[in-house]
Amino acid sequence: MSAFLRVLAVDDEPPALDELAYLLRADPRVGKLHTASDATDALRVLRDTDVDVVFLDIRMPGLDGMELARVLRRFARPPAIVFVTAYDDAAVDAFDLGVTDYVRKPVQAERIGESLRRVVSSRVVATHPAAVARAESDPTIPVELAGTTRMLPRSAVRWVEAQGDYARLHTAEGSHLVRVPLATLAERWADAGFVRIHRSYLVQLRLIAELRLANSGYVVVVDSTELPVSRRHTRELKDKLVRAAKQDWNR
């Protein structure tokens, strides 16, 4: 695919749309830029024009950006989606939709450039079935890192800790706080091997190095860190560890 991208920018606030359009036009990877003031206008553009990526505001009147993104995902050849928003409370839905990037306002030229780099990379590898399979099996979730929103692969998460309505994702390099309830991640990540061990902890089952009885009850060890196992989850966890071990033996 040519590096000259066909881009659609969508925002219902004229100053924000003008600023985004200015930054996109200034990037040499953008070959053609369309703009739209709302989702209906965007769909008119998409009806007549093929685009590679949509830079999309989330909070808009009528059909909002999240709803428009779901519509775009049903296209035969869906464009990449980059959310551009002043809010971080759409992280879970963005994660589910598999967006390419999640940019916080006010936008900066360097941040838009990074998004375009990711778009070019994602569109190139999309022609390779193995790359598509990896992307589908290892979705990403937006996290804040040094004031910038990054897309963290789920496979990098070792365990998750509840912090009120938020969850802290622990990786080998550090941790990230996201506005996602632990119960939501427990439900959505169950098929990926994450198990609830406590009302405050979710752990990748294959990374549990040890389950042992401590003074206050059972604990598991993940990356040399002890995490408590509640009494109600102990039996189920033991069963899952035994089943996982048997599957490994039979390979």
Image (cartoon, grey):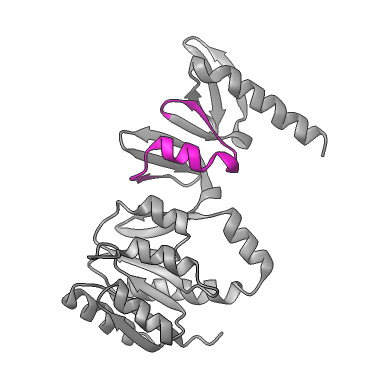
Seen as rendered, the residue at the extreme top is: 215
Task: Name above or below for residue 77 compared with residue 176.
Answer: below
Name the residue rendered at 26%, 56% in the picture.
87
> Is residue 250 shown in magenta?
no
- Residue 83 rendering spot, x and y as whole percentages: 35, 65
> Is residue 178 shown in magenta?
yes
- Lateral position of residue 36 relative to residue 155, left or right: left
Name the residue rendered at 26%, 70% in the picture.
107
The answer to whether residue 29 of the structure is visible from this angle is: no
- Lateral position of residue 230 relative to residue 106, left or right: right
Q: Quadrant of residue 250?
A: top right
Name the residue rendered at 54%, 75% in the picture.
77
- Lateral position of residue 47 relative to residue 154, left or right: left
Name the residue rendered at 32%, 87% in the picture.
25
Of the pair 88 and 110, the residue shown nearer to us: 88
Task: Name above or below for residue 146 compared with residue 240.
Answer: below
On the rendered image, what quadrant is the C terminus found in? Answer: top right
Residues rendered magenta in the picture: 176-200
- Residue 73 rendering spot, x and y as whole percentages: 48, 66
